[in-house]
Amino acid sequence: MHEVGLNYTRYKMAVASQFIWQNIFHQYKPCDRRNYQQVKLFINVFNASKVAYTGSGEIYFSANYLEKYPTRYLRREFTGIMYREMARVWQWNGDGQANPGLIDGIANYVRMKANLAPVGQSTKPKCGGRWDQGGDVTARFLDYCDSMRKGFVADLNMKMKYSYSDNYFQQLLGKSVNQVWRQYKKKKANLAPVGRLVSQTHVWWQMVPRWERYGQVLGLL
């Protein structure tokens, strides 16, 4: 069967880390980053509905999800989820004070900026009900904030190193987060649909056994 392979996984974990440090969080010095000496990635069978989760420098993928995902796009999906979860490893969370929806939104923002959004995901901006709804909604809102201030997500992440406050939006953008959200909704809500995202990249596959040993380390950065 088609599989991404151990070497690919390790390589992409390193590439994703560099992308996050350099392009998203602007953490050019090790002292600016979270202090993990290594990051482990596991493929596990678990009952939770989550596709993947991360904690303490360890990333867990759902073997069930990967087994069922269309083979044609498996490598892209695997890589996209990896970028999202690597963002969770390296991002600051306000010492646990930040809204989970914002944390999730930042991770999905990283995936989006890496051009690894899920195949078939709509490219029309999503307004949603709340700015901190999480997922693609918050990711696209953060992209809008970044258009107002270049490097906004990097600056916000740095402010979240030790604490969190919604007032950080005011400090960085000159407007409250709710004001920016209303402005974003007004600007984006009436945009016409622009189709659905489909990968135009040719995907090359490596032939190796598929998830043959669940629960063991697949990748180690």
Image (cartoon, rainbow, N blue to C red):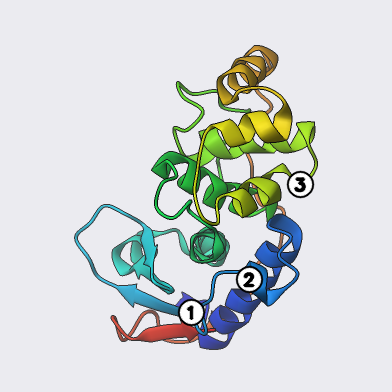
Identify whether 44 is placed above or below 145. below
Dot 2: what SS?
helix
Q: Label 2 near label 3: C-beta < 8 Å?
A: no
Q: Is residue 46 left or right of residue 144?
A: left
Q: Position of residue 73 (x, y in %)?
A: 54, 60
Q: Residues within 10 Å of mark 1 (few under 14, many from 20)?
A: some
Q: Residues within 10 Å of mark 2 (few under 14, many from 20)?
A: some
Give the amino acid type for the residue marked by disc 2 in the picture. Answer: Ser
Q: Which residue is mark 3?
A: 151
Q: Which residue is mark 2?
A: 17
Q: Which residue is mark 1?
A: 39
Dot 3: what SS?
loop
Q: Specify the farthest residue to the right.
A: 150
Q: Label 1 near label 2: C-beta < 8 Å?
A: yes
Q: Position of residue 161 (x, y in %)?
A: 55, 56
Who's the residue at 68% across and 38% down the image? Answer: 143
Pair 3/1: label in front: 3
Q: Position of residue 148 (x, y in %)?
A: 77, 31
Give the amino acid type for the residue marked by disc 1 in the picture. Answer: Val
Q: Specify the farthest residue to the left.
A: 47
Who's the residue at 64% across and 41% down the image? Answer: 197
Q: Foreground: 49 or 99?
A: 99
Q: Position of residue 207 (x, y in %)?
A: 52, 84
Quarter placement of the C terminus: bottom right
- Cα gap from disc 2 to disc 1, whole angstroms: 10 Å
Residue 147 image-quadrant placement: top right
Q: Label 1 near label 3: C-beta < 8 Å?
A: no
Dot 1: what SS?
loop
